[in-house]
Amino acid sequence: MNHMFWPRRRFCGAAAISVLFFAVTGGPAAAQTAVAGDVVALKVWAYGTAPDGAARRDLFMFDPVFVRDRLETVVDGALHVELMDETVLRLGSATQMVVDEFVYEDSAGSLQFLASLSKGVCRFVTGKAKSKKFRVQTPTASIVARGTTFSVWVDGNGETVVWVQEGEVDVISAVDGGSATVGATEIVKAPATGGIELDATRPPGDPGIGDSSKINSKTTKRGSSQ
């Protein structure tokens, strides 16, 4: 299959935000209809699974991503998702993540975001919302961002490494509550034994978390000529 990069489509505005709000707050909309964003780049292959017992589905360019979807990439794969507030999630190789919560109110410029990263690597590039409650949960850490760009690695034991490229994050150990504030260029580790290890070593780089325009992508559907 030839790999091509396609310009992203735009979201459906206030209607999508309304549906999203009802789904997250337990209203009448089903979780699988609550659009959080769409796919803007792919490499090799990626999957999404709704929480309602639906079968795992292949993801293609421009496909919607829903609140509470489990997102997965294969080895050497990548998946980039742009959310409605222009936050970008860049999943690298062999990564699993759930978008647990996404509530964006454009008129108020506010965002509530929660994701669970169980393994692999993801770079988070936060969007345009002025007021953010942005948290990432891993097996050993809770990461609270303040308008920033940061990368998170989770190994097979659940140990977590956080590297901040821009801005600042708070990292709290899920084991014993130890915490650290991490600024730009700093790297910390949340070990399985607890506490926060400062001046940690950055894991090997993953090309899948780089700029979306440099990631090979699949067409919208198999056989599509778009």
Image (tube, rainbow, N blue to C red):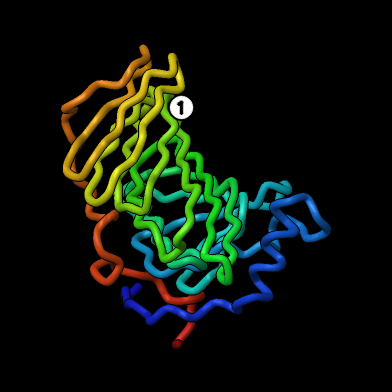
For the image, the number of numbered tags is: 1
Q: Residue at x 34, y 62 (%)?
A: 43
**Front residue of 183 and 216:** 183
Left or right of 58 on screen, residue 173: left
Q: x, y (%) of residue 122?
A: 35, 47
Is residue 9 placed above or below 54 in the rendered structure? below
Q: Residue at x 44, y 32 (%)?
A: 142
Q: Residue at x 28, y 26 (%)?
A: 189
What quarter of the picture does the N terminus occupy?
Answer: bottom left
Q: Quadrant of residue 193?
A: top left
Left or right of 84 on screen, residue 95: left
Q: Which residue is mark 1?
A: 139
What secondary structure is found at the residue carrying circle 1? loop
Left or right of 162 on screen, residue 22: right
Q: Residue at x 22, y 54 (%)?
A: 207
Residue extending farthest bottom: 226
Looking at the rendered structure, the kind of residue marked 1 is Pro
Q: x, y (%) of residue 128?
A: 42, 66
Q: Quadrant of residue 81?
A: bottom left
Is residue 26 placed above or below 225 in the rendered structure? above
Left or right of 33 on screen, residue 139: left
Q: x, y (%) of residue 185?
A: 16, 43
Q: Residues within 10 Å of mark 1 (few under 14, many from 20)?
A: many
Q: x, y (%) of residue 158?
A: 40, 26
**Front residue of 99 and 60:** 99
What quarter of the picture does the C terminus occupy?
Answer: bottom left
